[in-house]
């Protein structure tokens, strides 16, 4: 049986997809015939320019439907670039990265069923497992129900794919939403990028870059985050195992740039330090010029070993994305982040000393945020402006605000905070509840209006101190859309609004 | 404003004399003997167009027969030079703002066809100076000078760093949102309060 592993838009086009590079290698090493097809990359080259490619983001994010011309073009793309390449294979393993893969995947599945009947379709990836906060069915379940796939796999693919190859049609993770977790990540095969033409990607620099997975899950349990839903237990590879993989990609493909997909690249300090020491040594001996980036957590100052950041820099550590979230120590503590502004002071100075760079990821309007907390957030722009001027702070993502995600600690605190949702009007509604349209009885001052106002004030303060606001206008357009939904919601409310209860959630509608 | 200069001098007949000026005021003039880190304070700044100048003024090119470069068999064996390793204003590195352009002040027997400017990465081989300008607030100005680039719309959405520090579009959207909030204030504050206080 000939297998084809397929990745679908939307994925970032700056690196080859890692999930399918792993799955294809698992299938190959299990003794089966396999090839890989990156439809995200194919679409990038099929469309006339970058802007056309990025214009599709709004469709993938379900912020607008496709136009007739766009749909026609996508169908043409599927016929020419997808189905013709797919017809010689018997079984398709389609990896859906997240909910932004749903729209294209469904269109592709319908086309396969229509034009290539009899092929076996197996869906996988985190996108199969996405579910709405109000408890609707997962994407994988829905596709199976519509007979658009034969199986959908939930959880980590490395083991369950082998089960399917061995003929199993049921079991943990096979069209079943209770997957087993892999215990030893060191035993997994390295992704095989030999399945891809690495020259076809739109790299961010002149050097090729690939993803690295050093760990799965997270050591933290930040209240708003749903990582634990996908990976309940934190597991990590040894530092030497990760370094070996990076060295292999460098020696085989000349790849010297890496992007860690980990929730936190320094989740395990031991593994992180071991990796850095090996890479630093290799770098100095072979002049490999490794550069790598990833999400990072600032730790309490007393937990950071001496010379730690010097070794990180020698190992090629370059840019780190840190969930600073707020300027208020109190709010950061309530989020379970467990570091303070003083810890940030220390780490910014160390970053500055060793030429490391940082991106701040922010979350404005946390459920317990008071006006004093908000003022603390405003103060941070002046406090750390020096590090913008030194180039240490490379960017700040002010994001769009707090959303209640399913399977998060915060979702479990909905009753405790007296959270209720404002249902968008028919004009604005989608099939989903808008998780950003919430208010909390325990913190009535922070209603939708006030959250929007604080979000704007924060943005203005960032502008005042000349911070590098990342994706500023895109984020603000999303905030504007929320503001319009709130306005429309108020317009449609009766003079005496009433609350209703649905699926254990409280709504004004 | 705190000014921190890390500099090294090399000897020939005498040590090189470093001159630092801000807004045409000399704030430092002294010999640099080997390596030195100099800390200065200058607070008489203007809102715009402050000019920082750093240079050397005592290299002799044949005056009274004295040459501050000595050669033997076409090799320089002694030379009066300064090498600037770092210039920090309020702890922020500014050496790149000199753009590697050194302005020469010809003296003595230096030929008239000698250029007015030469490319140099912080090394001072002649009398003359490096310079750059800045405004206040200092950090805002340094951020723009060091990092703000002309916008390039050909770069992809995810990686378009040239859009950073160009706030025009953001300000427009902020105004749009304030207008929405204003409409809510004017027309729906009652409903808003009823829901909030429910």
Image (tube, coloured by chain):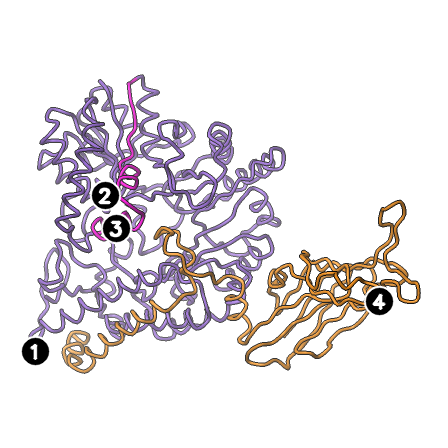
Chain colours: A purple, B orange
- Asked whether, in this view, residue A3 is left or right of residue B93, the answer is left
**Which mark, by number, is residue A495?**
1
Q: Nearer the viewer, residue A281 or B153?
A: B153
The residue identified by callout 4 is B108
Camera-nearest residue between A153 and B4: B4
Q: Position of residue A101 (x, y in %)?
A: 23, 43
Q: What whole-number distance in Å separates the C-alpha atoms at marks 3 and 1?
A: 38 Å
Residue B174 at x, y = what percent?
30, 71
Q: Secondary structure at mark 1?
A: loop
How far is disc 2 from disc 3 in space, using C-alphas?
A: 10 Å
Spatial separation of the CA atoms under disc 3 and disc 4: 67 Å
The residue that mark 3 highlights is A57
Label 2, residues with CA under 10 Å away: few <14, some 14-19, many ≥20: many
Numbered range of the magenta stretch: A32-61
Q: Is residue A51 magenta?
A: yes
Residue at 38% across, 65% down: A331
Q: Are circles 3 and 1 on residues that touch, CB within 8 Å?
A: no
Q: Residue at x 45, y 38 (%)?
A: A208
Which chain letter matches label 1? Answer: A
* Cα–Cα gap, marks 4 and 2: 74 Å
Marking on residue A324: none
Left or right side of B93 for A124: left
Q: Which residue is mark 2?
A: A101
């Amino acid at each position: 049986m000939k297998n084809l592993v397929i990745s679908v838009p939307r994925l970032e086009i700056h690196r080859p997809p890692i999930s399918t590079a792993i799955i294809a290698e698992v299938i190959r090493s299990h003794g089966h015939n396999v090839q890989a097809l990156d439809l995200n990359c194919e679409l990038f080259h099929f469309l006339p320019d970058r802007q056309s490619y990025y214009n599709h983001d709004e469709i993938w994010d379900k912020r607008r439907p496709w136009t007739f011309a766009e749909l026609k073009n996508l169908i043409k793309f599927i016929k020419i670039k997808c189905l013709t390449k797919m017809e010689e294979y018997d079984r398709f393993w389609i990896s859906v990265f997240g909910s932004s893969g749903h729209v294209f995947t469904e269109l592709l599945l319908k086309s396969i069923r229509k034009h290539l009947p009899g092929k076996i379709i197996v869906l996988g990836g985190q996108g199969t497992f996405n579910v709405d906060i109000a408890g609707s069915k997962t994407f994988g379940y829905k596709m199976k129900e519509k007979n658009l796939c034969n199986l959908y796999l939930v959880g980590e693919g490395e083991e369950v794919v082998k089960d399917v190859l061995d003929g199993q049609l049921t079991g943990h993770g096979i069209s079943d939403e209770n997957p087993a977790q892999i215990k030893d990540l060191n035993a997994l095969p390295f992704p095989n990028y030999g399945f891809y033409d690495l020259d076809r990607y739109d790299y961010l620099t002149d050097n090729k870059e690939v993803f690295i997975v050093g760990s799965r899950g997270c050591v933290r349990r930040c209240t708003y985050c749903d990582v634990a839903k996908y990976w309940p237990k934190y597991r990590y590879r040894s530092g030497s195992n990760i370094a070996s993989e990076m060295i292999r990609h460098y020696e085989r493909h000349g790849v010297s740039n890496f992007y860690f997909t980990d929730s936190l690249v320094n989740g395990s300090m031991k593994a992180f330090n071991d990796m850095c020491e090996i890479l630093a040594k290799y770098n100095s001996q072979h002049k490999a010029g490794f550069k790598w980036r990833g999400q990072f957590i600032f730790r309490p100052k007393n937990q950071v070993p001496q010379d730690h950041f010097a070794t990180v820099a020698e190992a090629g550590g370059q840019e780190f994305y840190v969930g600073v979230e707020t300027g208020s120590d109190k709010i950061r503590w309530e989020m379970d982040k467990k570091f303070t502004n003083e810890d940030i002071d220390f780490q910014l100075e160390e970053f500055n000393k060793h030429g490391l760079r940082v991106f701040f990821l922010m979350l404005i309007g946390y459920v317990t945020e008071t006006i004093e907390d908000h003022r603390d957030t405003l103060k941070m722009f002046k406090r750390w402006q020096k590090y913008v001027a030194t180039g240490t702070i490379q960017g700040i993502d002010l994001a769009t605000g707090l959303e209640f995600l399913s399977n998060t600690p915060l979702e479990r605190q909905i009753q405790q905070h007296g959270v209720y949702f404002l249902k968008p009007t028919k004009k604005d509604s989608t099939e989903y509840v808008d998780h950003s349209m919430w208010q909390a009885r325990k913190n009535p001052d922070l209603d939708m209006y006030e959250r929007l106002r604080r979000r704007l004030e924060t943005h203005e303060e960032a502008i005042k101190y000349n911070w590098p606001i990342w994706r500023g206008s895109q984020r603000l357009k999303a905030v504007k859309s929320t503001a319009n939904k709130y306005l429309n919601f108020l317009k449609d409310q009766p003079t005496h609004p009433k609350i209703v209860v649905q699926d254990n959630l409280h709504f004004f509608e | 404003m705190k000014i921190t200069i890390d500099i090294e001098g090399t000897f020939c007949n005498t040590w090189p004399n470093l001159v630092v000026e801000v807004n045409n005021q000399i704030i430092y003039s002294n010999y640099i003997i080997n390596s030195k880190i100099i800390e200065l304070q200058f607070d008489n700044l203007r809102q715009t167009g402050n000019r920082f100048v750093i240079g050397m003024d005592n290299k002799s090119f044949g005056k009274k027969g004295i040459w501050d470069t000595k050669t033997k068999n076409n090799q320089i064996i002694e030379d009066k030079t300064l090498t600037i390793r770092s210039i920090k204003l309020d702890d922020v590195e500014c050496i790149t703002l000199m753009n590697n352009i050194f302005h020469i002040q010809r003296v003595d027997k230096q030929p008239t066809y000698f250029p007015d400017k030469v490319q140099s990465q912080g090394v001072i081989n002649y009398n003359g100076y490096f310079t750059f300008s800045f405004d206040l607030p200092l950090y805002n100005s340094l951020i723009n000078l060091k990092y703000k680039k002309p916008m390039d719309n050909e770069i992809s959405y995810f990686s378009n760093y040239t859009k950073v520090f160009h706030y025009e579009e953001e300000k427009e959207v902020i105004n749009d949102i304030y207008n929405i909030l204003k409409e809510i204030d004017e027309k729906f504050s009652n409903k808003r309060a009823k829901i909030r206080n429910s």
